[in-house]
Image (tube, rainbow, N blue to C red):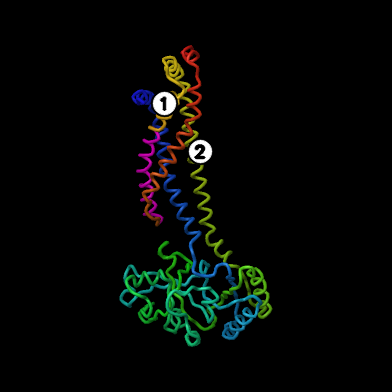
Amino acid sequence: MDIQPIFAALRKHKIPAALIVLEIALACAVLCNAVFMIGQRVGEIHSPNGIDENGIVDIGVQGINPDTANADIPRYLATLREIPGVIAAAAVNMMPLGNNSWNMNAATSPDQLLAKDSPNVAEYLFTQGGPDALGLRLLQGRFFNDDEYADSKLGNNFLPSAHVVLVTQSLAKRLWPEANALGKPLWIGKNNRYTVVGIVADVLRPDANGGTAAHYLSAFFPVSPELTIQEFVVRSAPQDRDRIVRDGVQKLEALSPSVVVKGQTFAEIRDKYFANARSMVWMLVLVCVVMLAVTAFGIVGLTSFWVGQRRRQIGIRRAVGATRAHVMQYFQTENFLLSSAGVAIGMVLAFGINLYLMQHYQTTRLPWYYLPVSAIALWVLGQLAVLGPALRAASVPPVVATRDG
């Protein structure tokens, strides 16, 4: 098809044509980045976790008497373990994806602690039975021995005295990318050296210090029961979780009426943690829908206006032999050219917006394949939007069109 008449017609309607191009460009830029961010957030919401999420219950206790804590916490654990259906129970300092967060910088030597790339690590402490209670998956090495729990007390900087540690697979690869982490030293502070005795599947941390790449940088330490550990993780079969929460809260309140006990399943913890991410996903989806709808209505409106302005031209073309298909092809080609110009500008804008987000909001670089996908989506949208006006133009009888002039 000869596109010279199309360019000639567009030159006569420069402002409407420019508006459509800018509208498509803005839609392309926003769509690329919004879909990319939606994908990131959905990926975070469904991040895998190396614990038994379906069977875990978290029970927090506040108000433990400092004078009796060393005796109360073992009694609480014994009470929780006696509940029918409980597989394991342990006291912990924090839960994955929870509100409480203990973090320290870690390195393979004291000197590397001062380096800028020294990773920030989530510091999990748990009492005997912790690996079973969390459902940790051991990949290499071993879990802690009983004597390592018994001899471990919290000292300076709330670090345990037992010099053994479990690390996640991601942390092992981060610190020892070319070597096996088992038996290697892990330093937290210049005076705290720990030996890696086991590597476990990646466990999400309570926060995201260091960005998305740091979600799985976690280390696990053994500790004996004491006042600073006032949270309990209880594992059971998934169908028993709700009952375990109720029974656990009731039994601990009966054991110590002065304390405040709150229980929740890990599914509830995960839902709360990712509530903002889910809200952002729906907000971005709404932005995409609104942007595409506005673009489609803009194309329909301006194309319909052009059809009304060109009735004489359409009638003449029909009178000299142009078919309905030729008329439709004309408007579809015109829209494709405008969409292509808008997409080209939109790709540049998309990268500009992405660079701004990278600098100010720590997002990652926009993958290149989002651009052709968005371009195809806008080409299809343009063709669908122009279809109605094109059909109306093609249905104009030649005689009526020429008489309108």
Foreground: disc 1 or disc 2: 1
Question: Which one is earlier in the sequence, the residue at label 1 or at label 2?
Answer: 2
Residue to which mark 2 is pinned: 293
Residues at discs 1 and 2 in contact (Cβ within 8 Å): no
The disc placed on residue 256 is none
Q: Is residue 127 above or below residue 373?
A: below
| Magenta segment main secondary structure | helix
Q: Residues within 10 Å of mark 1 (few under 14, many from 20)?
A: some
| Callout 2 amino acid | Ala
Quarter of the image with the N terminus in it: top left
| Callout 1 amino acid | Tyr
What kind of element bears circle 1?
Answer: helix
What kind of element bears circle 2?
Answer: helix
Q: Which residues are magenta?
A: 338-361
Determine the residue positioned at 51% across, 24% down. Answer: 392
Residue 79 on image: x %, y %: 64, 81
Residue to which mark 1 is pinned: 330
In the image: residue 227, left or right of residue 196: right
Q: Is residue 241 above or below residue 399?
A: below
Q: Is residue 297 magenta?
A: no
Give the total of numbered labels.
2
